[in-house]
Image (spheres, grey):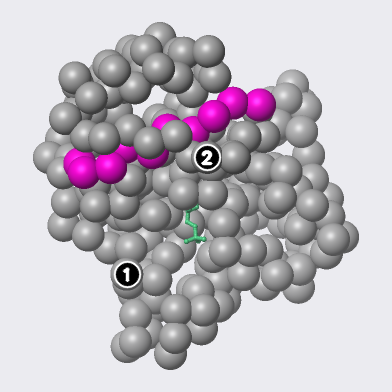
């Protein structure tokens, strides 16, 4: 199977996971990216069963709506006292403890917000994303544009990595992305917390403190499930 076929295979397994575990009429959080897109196409068949979706990006909202899947504002979900039992999303890298680097698609802030509310975070990816140590994939950070240079300097000092502006890219929240190259992250939880303290950083792409609860990993031998 090529990478696209692996993404489709894991998307089908994730759809079956949702069908088995999401209560009838429940709210589903939906991630962003090419693997998440395969998943969205698969859950169109569960339309009558899913009460509504919360989208982690505008692109995801549009794709869900194109299938006739109802999309709810997260504020409304919380205000109505509803829960979100499951959130399904991809990752750029994931380690053995199910900590992740996310944000390759630039949606990290909304993804982290939706993930924080979810009961179970189900990560879906192909085997190329599984790593022993996070950091080969450049770590994205969403930054307030006026703080870009001062944040870059602090990132160099703190991590020893090389921050690069993602040229021509603006997030759904109107901010910029710095991708930090050349990292080898031995303690993802500690680094995530340090990055959160930098003024001007809206969000960093380390999902370690709230990592995935379930990993569905597409391999040539089939889709493997790992629980945290
Ligand atoms: C978007 C993300 C995606 O989950 C991540 O980039 C993986 O994307 P893909 O499934 O296209 O490889 O974090 O912000």
Of all residues, the one furthest to the top in this rendering is 199
Q: Residue 128 carries which label?
A: 1
Q: Which of marks 2 and 1 is nearer the N terminus?
A: 1
Task: Give the residue number, with chain letter if any, for mark 2.
Answer: 167
Work out whether residue 221 or residue 169 is closer to the camera in this orientation and state it.
169
Task: Name the image quarter holding residue 58.
Answer: top right
Q: Percent x, y for residue 28?
A: 65, 49
Q: Is the residue marked 1 within 8 Å of ligand 1, measured from its CB?
A: no
Q: Percent x, y for residue 138?
A: 33, 46
Query: On screen, 122 above or below 4?
Result: above
Q: Is 39 on the left or on the right of 217, as rendered? A: right
Q: Which residue is drawn at 26% across and 35% down?
A: 162
Residue 16 is a magenta residue: no
Q: Is 42 on the left or on the right of 157, as rendered? A: right
Q: Give the range drawn in magenta.
A: 174-183
Mark 2 crowdedness (10 Å alpha carbons): few <14, some 14-19, many ≥20:
few
Disc 1, SS: helix
Q: In which quarter of the image is the N terminus?
A: bottom left
Query: On screen, 145 above or below 177?
Result: above
Q: Percent x, y for residue 145?
A: 54, 19
Q: Percent x, y for residue 180?
A: 32, 37
Distance CA(mark 2)–CA(mark 1): 26 Å
Residue 179 is a magenta residue: yes
Task: Name the image quarter holding residue 205.
Answer: top left
Disc 2, SS: loop
Q: Residue at x 51, y 83 (%)?
A: 5
């Amino acid at each position: 199977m090529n990478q696209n076929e692996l993404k489709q295979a894991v998307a089908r397994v994730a759809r079956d996971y949702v069908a088995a575990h999401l209560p009838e009429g429940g709210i589903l959080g939906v991630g962003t990216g090419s693997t998440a897109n395969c998943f969205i196409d698969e859950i169109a068949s569960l339309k009558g069963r899913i009460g509504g979706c919360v989208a982690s990006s505008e692109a995801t909202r549009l794709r869900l709506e194109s299938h006739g899947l109802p999309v709810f504002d997260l504020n409304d979900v919380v205000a109505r006292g509803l829960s979100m039992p499951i959130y399904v999303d991809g990752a750029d890298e994931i380690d053995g403890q199910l900590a992740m680097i996310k944000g390759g698609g630039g949606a990290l802030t909304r993804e982290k917000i939706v993930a924080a509310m979810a009961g179970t975070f189900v990560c879906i990816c192909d085997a190329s994303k599984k790593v022993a140590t996070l950091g080969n994939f450049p770590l994205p950070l969403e930054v307030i544009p006026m703080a870009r240079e001062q944040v870059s300097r602090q990132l160099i000092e703190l991590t020893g990595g090389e921050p690069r502006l993602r040229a021509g890219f603006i997030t759904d929240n109107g901010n910029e992305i710095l991708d930090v190259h050349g990292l080898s992250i031995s303690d993802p939880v500690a680094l995530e917390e340090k990055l959160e303290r930098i003024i001007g950083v809206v969000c960093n792409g380390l999902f370690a403190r709230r990592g995935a609860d379930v990993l569905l990993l597409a391999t040539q031998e089939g889709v493997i499930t790992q629980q945290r």
